[in-house]
Image (spheres, rainbow, N blue to C red):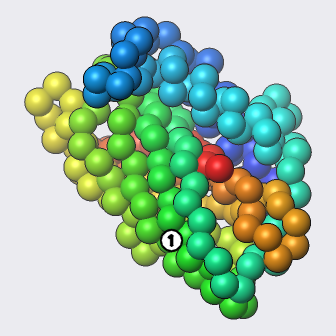
């Protein structure tokens, strides 16, 4: 099953985040716990997303999987990003997937290292709650508290996506889709996408 809206959402979110990459926070030494800059995260996310969706048209470049492994595990790392009240916002994403028979399973993970286009780093992390696979589609909520400039922002970003790539009975190579929710008290003030491989 193909969800063109999801592909367009993923392409649009990553392209918008990349197009807004103006924050040049210094991340020349990430080995010393210096967070990656907005520009770096956006470039990395764009490169990853470009392998599964045409960022100009939203057309899928990789086959969306409708048959998943019956008994396998996989870890995916990538990005969740998009627009937060009109400005770019992106963080690093980890998903641990346990595939079960019947195109079902569970997903745990989280997101951290968030950067805002103009406001810089958001500290804290989000935990994936209710992560599941149902009918080869994934869903779950990244929840927690992020801090920027001394202010805490209760955050809830919902993920809705699919698996892509790989041969039948193999673990899919990429996962991606739409992301939406709120950061702080604004209702539905975040719209974007996610991608991980």
For the N terminus, the image quarter is bottom right
119 vs 140: above or below: above
| Depth order, front residue of 166/179 | 166
Between 58 and 38, the one lying in front of the other is: 38
x and y percentages locating residue 49 in the rendered image:
71, 38
Residue drawn at 74 percent across, 56 percent down: 173
The residue located at (42%, 61%) in the rendering is: 109
Q: How dense is the environment of label 1, judged by Cα within 10 Å: few (below 14), some, or many (20 and up)?
A: many
Residue 163, percent from left and from top: 72, 62
Q: Residue at x 68, y 71 (%)?
A: 137
The x and y percentages for residue 66 are 82, 74
Residue 66 visible in the displayed image: no
Residue 151 visible in image: yes
Residue that numbered label 1 is attached to: 107
Front one among 46 and 165:
165
Q: Name, please, the residue furthest toward the left.
A: 150
Q: Tell me the element at label 1.
A: strand
Left/right of residue 152 with respect to residue 85 in the rendered view: left
């Amino acid at each position: 099953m193909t969800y063109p809206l999801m592909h367009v959402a993923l392409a649009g979110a990553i392209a918008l985040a990349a197009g807004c990459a103006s924050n040049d926070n210094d991340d020349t030494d990430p080995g010393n716990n210096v967070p990656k800059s907005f520009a770096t995260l956006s470039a990395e996310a764009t490169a990853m997303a470009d392998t599964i969706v045409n960022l100009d048209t939203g057309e899928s470049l990789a086959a969306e999987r409708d048959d998943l492994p019956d008994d396998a595990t996989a870890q995916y790392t990538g990005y969740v990003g998009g627009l937060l009240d009109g400005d770019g916002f992106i963080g690093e994403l980890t998903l641990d997937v346990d595939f079960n028979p019947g195109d079902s399973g569970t997903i745990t993970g989280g997101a951290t290292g968030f950067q805002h286009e103009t406001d810089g780093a958001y500290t804290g992390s989000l935990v994936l709650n209710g992560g599941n696979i149902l009918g080869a589609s994934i869903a779950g909520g990244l929840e927690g508290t992020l801090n920027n400039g001394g202010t805490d922002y209760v955050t809830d970003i919902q993920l809705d996506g699919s698996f892509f790539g790989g041969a039948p009975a193999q673990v899919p190579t990429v996962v991606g889709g739409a992301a939406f929710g709120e950061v702080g008290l604004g209702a539905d003030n975040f719209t974007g996408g996610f991608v991980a491989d």
